Amino acid sequence: MREVAFIKQNKEKWLNFEQAISNNNLKDPDELASLYVHLINDLSYAQTYYPKSKVIIYLNHLASQAFQKIYKTKREDSNRIIEFWKTEVPLLAYQYRKFIYIAFIVFGFFTFIGAISAANDGEFVRSILGDPYVDMTMENIKNGDPVAVYKSGSNWGSFIGITVNNLRVGIISFVMGVFGGFGTLWILFKNCVMLGSFQYFFYEQGVFWESVRGIWIHGSMEIFAIVIEAAAGLILGASILFPGTYSRKVSFKRGVKTGVKILISTFPFTFSAGFLEGFITRYSNVMPNFASVLIILFTLSLISYYYLVYPFKVYKREHQKLVLPEYA
């Protein structure tokens, strides 16, 4: 069958299904699953016979929306909060994984810019971090404790202050996505340039390892969360710039809803990072190296697994549960 004939034959069915999903007109999970199977069959056919066609992108998007709808409709009596963290967020992370990957690529690029700028301009670090902070850090390095700044204040005071600030940065990063994602990129740029120049400064002073084993005890989850929050902002921006088959208003609402869920998912990690910075990082210079490395690896592995690995496992599990056992 020619591609034009294939599209003509199924176009009305796809559009009706898309409209039904958008308007929540389909409530019966059996009906949803049946239509989902038809969509998967159409998608498989298109991938086989029209591998370069744009219809594949459209059907893949539609099937993804159908899958999300089935999951919500089929959810049995269970704790809503647990399901949110256990299933809903991972499915969103899987569905919007490209935005997470883009956020990480941009993060690496901007951080590299900060490091290179610091390496080629002796005054760059001061212009970014400020003279008082640099002078204080230089004094701390001379005294043999490069990360002594994290020992200032009380444990609880540091924990609360740092956590509130990180939550504020994450929320602003997301909200700035309303400017087509460019506001989010600007927030990410400022933070990454600061991070890159900050780490190069310690490298230049010959205390790079001391800074790493101190800063990244809390930084692994803190920075990772910032990247995920930036991804949420990019999703919001894309919903405005690229509404696809939806009206811009509907697309924007979907972008806000999805972005807020992903943003909220980072809060436990932000709280954990604040706790580590307030109660653990201040002792990094006296704890054994293996203890610092163990904490860094554990926290980095935990958040990496949740956003980069676990979503694939959840998608595979839920996909098989919804399609194969009950509706095959």
Image: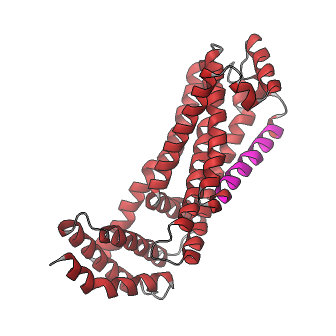
Q: Main secondary structure of the magenta part?
A: helix
Q: Quadrant of the C terminus?
A: bottom left
Residue 199 painted magenta: no
* Residue 162 part of the magenta segment: yes
Q: Residue at x 59, y 69 (%)?
A: 257
> In this view of the protein, can residue 14 be seen by the observer?
yes
Q: Is residue 199 above or below residue 174?
A: above
Reply above or below: 276 against 80.
above
**Image position of 230 (left or right of 284):** left
Residue 309 location (% of width, % of height): 43, 49
Side of 241 where 169 appears, left or right: right
x and y percent of residue 112 in the render?
54, 32
> Which residue, as the protein is rendered here, is positioned at the far left?
1
Query: In screen coordinates, is 132 left or right of 58?
Result: right
Q: Position of residue 84 (x, y in %)?
A: 56, 64
From which residue to which does the magenta span run? 157-175
Picture residue at 47% right of the left edge, 79% below the top: 73
- The answer to whether any part of residue 288 appears in the image is no
Question: Front-most of 244 and 227?
Answer: 244
Numbered label tally: 0
Residue shown at 52% from the left, 33% from the top: 297
Quarter of the rendering containing residue 223 = top right
Left or right: 208 as drawn, with respect to 98:
right
The percent coordinates of residue 164 (x first, y second) are 77, 48
Q: Between residues 84 and 120, which one lies in front from this camera angle? A: 120
Q: In the displayed orientation, state which residue is furthest to the front.
A: 121
Quadrant including the N terminus: bottom left
Q: Residue at x 55, y 53 (%)?
A: 231
